[in-house]
Structure formats: structure tokens, C-alpha cells
Amino acid sequence: MKERGIEMVVNFLVRAILGAALIFFVNQFLDSQEISVAVGLNPITFLTGGILGLPGIALLYGIVCWKIL
């Protein structure tokens, strides 16, 4: 039981760190293309990436794009 909890925490942290890195690099790429769509790096986006993974990151960019319209 304890091992499963540790596995869940490690899984969350890996997804959150990779999600934050993905947001950083996508923001850099979009900035180099002069596209003004950027998701901020903050605790909420860190949690979203950790809990939802890649679909959560896509959701964040979708929300920002929707806000621009």
C-alpha cells in the first residue's frame, strides 16, 4: 500500500515537471514565431500538468486561445 502511494507521488512529480518544461519550450517556440499565446508558469499550471498530464497542458493552451477570441 505504501509503495503505491510513493508511485503515485513520483508519477505526479514527473508529469508536473515535464508539463512545466513543455509549457516553457512551447512558449519559447510561439514567441520566436511572434505568436502572442503564452501560458504562465505558476502553481496552478504545475498542478494541472501533474494531474491531467499532456491533455491538461493542451487544455491550458486552449483556454488561452479561447480567451484571445
Image (cartoon, grey):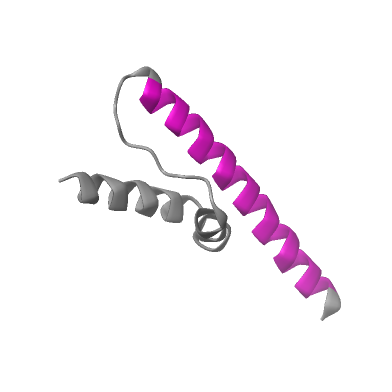
Along the viewing direction, whichever of 34 and 49 lies nearer the viewer: 34
Residue furthest out toward the bottom: 1
Percent across and percent down for residue 29 are 42, 24
Q: Is residue 21 left or right of residue 6?
A: left
* Magenta-highlighted residues: 3-31
> Considering only vertical position in the picture, is 33 above or below 3?
above
- Which residue appears at 71% of the width and 67% of the height? 8
Residue furthest out toward the right: 2
Percent across and percent down for residue 1 are 82, 81
Q: Is residue 12 left or right of residue 22?
A: right
- Which residue appears at 55% of the width and 46% of the height? 19
Q: Is residue 45 magenta?
A: no
Magenta region, main secondary structure: helix
Along the viewing direction, whichever of 15 and 61 lies nearer the viewer: 61
Percent across and percent down for residue 28 are 46, 26
Percent across and percent down for residue 16 are 61, 52
Q: Is residue 27 magenta?
A: yes
- Which residue appears at 74% of the width and 59% of the height? 10
> Considering only vertical position in the picture, is 11 above or below 68?
below
Q: Is residue 48 left or right of residue 17?
A: left
